[in-house]
Amino acid sequence: MPEHTTILSGKKFNITLDRLCYQLIENHGNFKDSALVGLQPRGIFLAEALQLRLNEILKPAKVPYGILDTTFHRDDFRTHKGPLLPSSMKMEIVVENKKIIFVDDVLYTGRTIRAGLDALLDFGRPASVELLVLVDRRFSRQLPIEPNYVGLMVDSRASQRVKVNWKAAGEEDNVWLLSE
């Protein structure tokens, strides 16, 4: 069984989410021209948590929110042996000329973000795209992609994994570093 170290939990987890919300408000105000887009599969939990907090802070304003599936835009989708099952998608927001904030739990190689950019263009041309991640594994990038908003930076070895657990998925909110 892999060893694990908790690197973010409890009060620090909540403080990190609050800090990310206030950074977003600092740059996007009441989100009149901006929208959050959670990337499937695990970025949606962070995006939903941020949207709930932002809606509470910005009452009565509502933060526009979408869920984007990148399955068939990935550069490795043809290498799978079996059929791929896409995740759900809910893009009921206007993308055209909006400032889009991609939300994902962990930034590792950058390939999901690249796929997300391709998938987003199916819905229009945004004014800009920013990236918010809870965890940045900064020494693992395969593509030149950097986040605009980071909850936590983790320097990890290739043999390690970062796992984010969410209450919304039936677990306790925390981040683990797993070592094989």
Image (cartoon, helix red, strand yellow):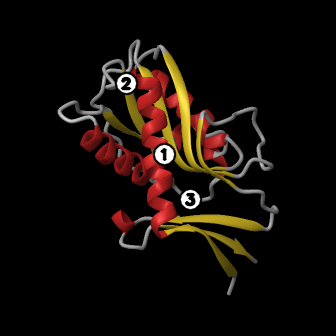
- The residue that mark 2 highlights is 29
- How many residues crowd mark 3 within 10 Å: few (<14), some (14–19), many (20+)? few
Q: Earlier in the sequence, mark 2 or mark 3?
A: 2
Whole-Å distance between the Cαs marked 1 and 2? 15 Å
The dot on residue 111 is none
Label 2 close to label 3 by CB (< 8 Å): no
Report the side of 116 relative to 95 (left or right): right
Q: Nearer the viewer, residue 134 or 90?
A: 134
Indicate the secondary structure of the residue bearing disc 2.
loop
Label total for image: 3
Q: Is residue 17 left or right of residue 147?
A: left
What residue is drawn where x is 68% and y is 87%? Answer: 1
User: At label 3, which amino acid type do we have?
Assistant: Gly
Work out how far the residue at label 2 is from the one at label 3, CA to CA, in angstroms.
Answer: 45 Å
- Residue 26 picture quarter: top left
Q: Earlier in the sequence, mark 1 or mark 3?
A: 1
Q: Amino acid at mark 2?
A: Gly
Q: Which label belongs to residue 19?
A: 1
Q: Which mark is residue 82?
A: 3
Disc 2 crowd rating (10 Å Cα; few below 14, some 14-19, many 20+) is few
Q: Is residue 39 visible?
A: yes
> Residue 102 placed where, x, y %?
49, 35
Residue 152 coordinates in the image, percent (x, y): 62, 53
Foreground disc of the pair 1, 3: 1
